[in-house]
């Protein structure tokens, strides 16, 4: 039984780690009351998705799809599309983080805190 689990983790362990990273981000988004921590957890989830796609796109014994002097079978090439998509996802992630940090700055200026409970308490006081 233990050898089967070890074999599964050795062959598919990277997917378990990616799932663990994603669940860590989801847990942090749900449980944290600090907006900065929520933003960090959102970035952790984005990294988990990018990591999953890049791990999924790799091929054992694969080579880059570049024109070479030697003829290589098309089966040996690694698909470049997921890598290009993940470069775009990284740029979107950076943009999202920048906008989130700008919003956190404005929230801190307006409410004096980035704690969710403090902001809700202050908003309810004005009603």
Image: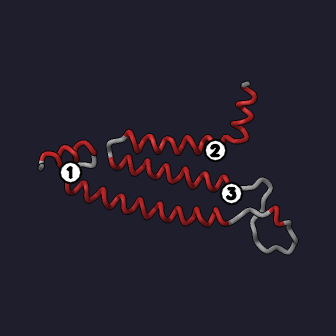
Q: Indicate the quadrant containing the N terminus: top left, top right, bottom left or bottom right.
A: top right
Q: Which mark is residue 57?
A: 3
Which of the colour schemes (rainbow, by chain, secondary structure, one colour) is used? secondary structure
Residue at 32% x, 45% y: name it. 34
Considering every residue shown, the one lying at the far left of the view is 126
Q: CA distance from mark 3 to mark 2?
A: 12 Å
Instruction: Residue under label 2, please give it.
Output: 15
Considering every residue shown, the one lying at the far right of the view is 71
Q: Please give left or right for residue 22 compared with residue 73 in the image.
A: left
Residue at 48% x, 64% y: name it. 92
Q: CA distance from mark 1 to mark 3?
A: 45 Å
Q: Which mark is residue 36?
A: none
Q: Which mark is residue 112?
A: 1
Q: Position of residue 75 (x, y in %)?
A: 82, 62
Give the label, 1 or 2, closer to the camera: 2
Instruction: State which quadrant residue 33 falls in.
Output: top left
Instruction: State which quadrant residue 59 falls in.
Output: bottom right
Give the label, 1 or 3, closer to the camera: 3
Q: Which of pointers 1 and 3 lies earlier in the amino acid sequence?
A: 3
């Amino acid at each position: 039984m233990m050898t089967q689990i070890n074999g599964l983790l050795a062959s598919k362990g990277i997917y378990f780690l990616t799932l663990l990273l994603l669940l860590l981000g989801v847990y942090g988004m749900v449980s944290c009351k600090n907006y900065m921590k929520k933003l960090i957890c959102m970035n952790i989830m984005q990294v988990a998705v990018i990591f999953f796609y890049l791990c999924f796109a790799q091929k054992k014994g694969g080579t880059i799809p570049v024109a070479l002097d030697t003829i290589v079978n098309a089966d040996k090439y690694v698909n470049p599309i997921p890598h290009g998509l993940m470069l775009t996802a990284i740029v979107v992630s950076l943009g999202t983080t920048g906008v989130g940090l700008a919003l956190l700055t404005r929230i801190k200026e307006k409410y004096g805190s980035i704690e969710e409970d403090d902001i809700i308490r202050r908003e309810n006081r004005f009603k």
